Image (spheres, coloured by chain):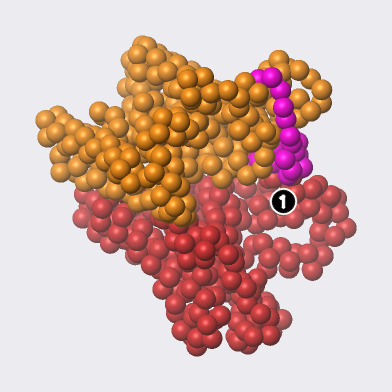
Amino acid sequence: MPPDSVTMQVAPAADAAAPPPRRGETARKLLRAGSLLTFVAVFAVFAATAPGFLNAGNLANIVGQVAVIGVLALGMTLVVVGGGNDVVRGGIDLSLANNLGLCAAVYATVLGDGWGDGAALLATAATGLLVGAVNAVSVVLLGILPLLATLAVMNVCAGLELVLTHNTVVAASSPVLDVIAGEYPAGVPVLGYVLLGATAVLFVVLQLTPAGLRLYAVGGHREAARAAGLPVGTYVAASYLGSGLCAALASLLSVALLSGSTTGSGDMLLSVVVTALLGVVFSRRLVATIPGTLLSALFVGMLINGFQLLNVSSYWVNGVQGVLILLVVAATSTLRREAR
Amino acid sequence: MRTPSRYALVVALIAVFAFFSVATTTFLTPGNLLGILVNNFALLAIVSMGMTLAIAAGGIDLSVGTSIDIASLVFVAAVAAHQNFAVALIGAVAGGLAVGAFNAVLIAALRVTPFLATLGTLFIGQSVQQLSTSGGQPIYLITGHVPAAFSFIGHGTVLGVPFTLIVVAAVVAAFAAIMGRSLFGRRVVALGAQPGVAWYSGLRVSRDTALVYLFSALACAIAGILLSCTVRAYVPLSGNAYLLNAIGATFIGTTFSPAGRPSVIGTLLGVLLLNIVANGLLLIGWNFYWQQVGTGVLIFLVLVISFGSRRLRSGAVPLNSAAS
């Protein structure tokens, strides 16, 4: 892919030019403040109207409820950062949700065959990494568009999961699962701690280390990053491996939560994409960030939880999510245009 | 250098066709081939036409399923309420076009990127359907109580040719004419290849973009009507099943064009490849699970061959707009 990209840079796309610093800065600050304000406002409305919302136990539960999608969205964030935010030609990992399904199936099957937790965990991590590696090879070495490569890999994962599970629930129990699904230290489900832990680790790597900054450089302008001497391919490949590992981690959470490997994990894909992309508004430069993704996951979890407590049909959640994306993106692109 | 990329798809198609013809006794029978065309090829081909246009214009339409579903919902609800059949048809098309118009406003007027705009539409469409069917209850029509025209669209034949296939041919011909012969089609190609240049050249980018998503929604509405007539029901959220295959078929089809661009013929070949592989794997006794693996691997191989040989000719294919 890289050598070809020069051709398109001849003409800057009409709506994708960099805004001059000052007005653009104000616009972005407005949007970011607006998003945070929305977050706080929704929180306040639920706190005032939904009985039991402000309960410490309930808030902790929200963190647990969004853990699976949250961890997946963290993986998606890595790929989006490394691939650039053009969703069609840039970085995206459509195989994430089905990779989770496959990892969950592997974990449950290996346990079911009488192996211990160690072997099962190894096999699961290896599966997630392997899928990530296939994505990395196809995108970096073979130069296939990420959207297409991960689409094909997604199909393969979905098929392999069905082969392993025969489209049924494979029950699983193990000490590790008991820990994850078990006690609530300090009132927060272990699932929630895993999400927060993964967020913390990725936050340090992506936002605080030089390697993280370089990954942003690679995604932001690949040719410039290459000219600056960065091993572009290595960074992109690493982002897909990281994403695969996130799928493996999320699969453990999912198995623990549902006491087994279940079908239909692919349905999570679009929610994961939305969560990762919605997180953009919580960042200063309107790019994907780890804290932004966490906030966005919590926001969606908060909506679902609040609606449940208010007895609003959960059928509204998708629609609200859709409207939110559109509002956010329309606001972003309008602000960008005005800033020019 | 062009040959391997351009004809990888045709070779793959011939190879799988030949393989299944030899490997099974049932594949190369008129009944089976017709079944592939009517049951599998028809709807995906129509939906993929809209997707081809959207991708050719440099966008993507993730809400094809939503247009199919909304058209089907309006259509079946109208028929179930004993409305005039023409009214039901018009309502279905209007329902599908409403989804397209929503996309058009978002993308052309508000400048939301197509991926996100149609993703938002998809999510909103899910809520609309769940709310209007109390959580996703299908609407079934009783066989004896549907108008004759309804059954004809789903299962009728004209001179022995299934009506469904005639509709497919008409839609494909229309899209081929739009993309290959019309001025609008040329502008769409310019839009997809170099949006900046198209804009600076004074093309009315917004209007053309809006039309692209309306055309895509129109194709999906037609698919929704055919789907409802075939299964005599509206099943909520069933249209999404076509989304990833339509994207896959269109992009597989881009390997057929020397410049790696979407084309009507390429997309049709892509749809055929997907359908033949799925059918053939079923006939040689692979269960549904392995079919999915096989299809995924095959798409992957076509992509590898195509992108691999494209990379040898550097500079020919704009793969990465590096817009950020």
Question: In this view of the protein, can residue A123 be seen by the observer?
Answer: no
Residue at the far right: name it. Answer: B25
B215 over A28 or under it: above or below: below
A211 over A70 or under it: above or below: above
**Residue for badge 1:** B277
Q: What stretch of residues is rendered in magenta?
A: A155-176
In the image, residue A104 lies in the stretch drawn in magenta: no
Residue at the image position 44 percent from the left and 42 percent from the top: A305
Q: Is residue B168 left or right of residue A60?
A: right
Question: Which chain is rendered orange in the image?
Answer: A
* A151, A121: nearer the viewer: A121
* A55, A87: nearer the viewer: A55
**Image location (x, y in percent) of residue A74:** 46, 28
User: Tag 1, which chain?
Assistant: B
Residue at the image position 60 percent from the left and 38 percent from the top: A98
Amino acid type shown at disc 1? Val
**Image location (x, y in percent) of residue A325:** 35, 46
The part of the image, by quadrant, that contains residue A340 is top left
At numbered mark 1, what does the secondary structure look like: helix, strand or loop? helix
Residue at the image position 21 percent from the left and 34 percent from the top: A33
* A278, B221: nearer the viewer: A278
* A211, B123: nearer the viewer: B123
Residue at the far top: name it. Answer: A210
A2 over A161 or under it: above or below: above
**Image location (x, y in percent) of residue B262:** 48, 52
Q: Is residue B241 left or right of residue A307?
A: right
Question: In this view of the protein, can residue A182 be seen by the observer?
Answer: yes
**Image location (x, y in percent) of residue B274:** 65, 52
A6 over B117 or under it: above or below: above
Question: Which chain is rendered red in the image?
Answer: B
In the image, residue A175 lies in the stretch drawn in magenta: yes
